[in-house]
Image (cartoon, coloured by chain):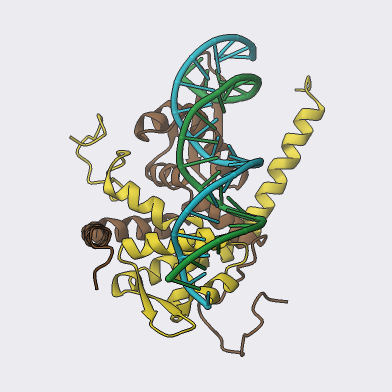
Chain colours: A brown, B yellow, C green, D cyan
Amino acid sequence: MTHTAADGGDADPFQWDVREDCEVRQILDRIADKWSLLVIALLDRRKLRFSELRREIDGISQRMLTVTLRQLERDGLVKRTVHPEVPPRVEYELTPLGGTLHTTIRSLVTWTERHQNEIAAAREEYDARAAAETALPAAR
Amino acid sequence: MTHTAADGGDADPFQWDVREDCEVRQILDRIADKWSLLVIALLDRRKLRFSELRREIDGISQRMLTVTLRQLERDGLVKRTVHPEVPPRVEYELTPLGGTLHTTIRSLVTWTERHQNEIAAAREEYDARAAAETALPAAR
DNA sequence: CCGTATCCAGAGGGATACTG
DNA sequence: CAGTATCCCTCTGGATACGG
């Protein structure tokens, strides 16, 4: 029933359901989305209005912010509150469920901040080596 | 110099550089990629050959697996080893740097597995409410 | 102010065929 | 086996304009 034909019964801590249509894969794609990640991170700090989010997230278009917020609302991670005033005011905040993502997302961001120099170095080295091999096609 | 015009000096644990062109955003997009995540997770278990990875990851095309592996190699997260044999054998494994992602990715997957039911429920409720409002456009 | 609707360019990514 | 190269189509996502 699982996807692996060769699971020899080892209780692998990293074994998961990787079928393309499975829930976990779907949700992972949503959470690990470029814009979703940023929205959740910002809302984790405090409740924010639409225009505030738009200003905070450099490079996001109005359309993508709307789409992202709708998805997160649908998934029960974000709560949307419309204040019936006459310049309309709409506020977004994390639901309790959304709040439980805090630790996980922090971990991701922290890792990235901590290792960005190593990654930049690795890239330079890789690119340098690639360039060298292109320059000497018949070498070796 | 930072992006916020209104940072009142609070040492916000969730304050980061969100400029579109910054390193962190770039790297985050790479790590939080659909296929990258799965590749890293699988390699965290053990060294794998190209064809093994392809078989394990349901739905990935040869092209995307190649592209993903090259990116990860370039970022210094994955090591590629070519064995000069005559059916060629190429093995992929995490570098030490790649290995440090273990905890973070585990956290993400665990969260998803743990809350998938809540998310599914939230989606159903959202869809049901949306359908109801479409059915009664003039209601109130 | 907070969206939705429409249009459209370009990247993402699958299928296929060919090399070392 | 492990790719690279090509074609082509879909879907993402930006720009713009309009509505509540």
- At x 35%, y 65%, the residue is B73
Q: Tell me the quarter of the image containing the N terminus of chain B.
A: top left
Q: Is residue B91 above or below residue B20?
A: below
User: Is residue B54 in view?
Assistant: yes
- At x 38%, y 59%, the residue is B71
Q: Position of residue B105 (x, y in %)?
A: 43, 66
Q: Is residue A33 above or below residue B74?
A: above
Q: Tell me the quarter of the image containing the C terminus of chain B.
A: top right
From the viewer's perspective, tell me whether residue A139 is left or right of residue B28.
left
From the viewer's perspective, tell me whether residue B16 is left or right of residue D16.
left
Tell me how many marks there are.
0
* Nearer to the camera, A39 or C10: C10
User: Is residue B36 in view?
Assistant: no
Q: Position of residue B115 (x, y in %)?
A: 58, 61
Q: Is residue B105 above or below residue A38?
A: below
From the viewer's perspective, tell me whether residue A9 is left or right of residue A78.
right
From the viewer's perspective, tell me whether residue D15 is left or right of residue B60.
left
* Nearer to the camera, D16 or C2: D16
- At x 42%, y 60%, the residue is A104
Q: Position of residue B27 (x, y in %)?
A: 34, 53
Residue that extends furthest to the right in the rendered view of this protein: B135
Q: Is residue A24 above or below residue A53?
A: below
Q: Quadrant of residue A27?
A: bottom right
- At x 62%, y 66%, the residue is B58
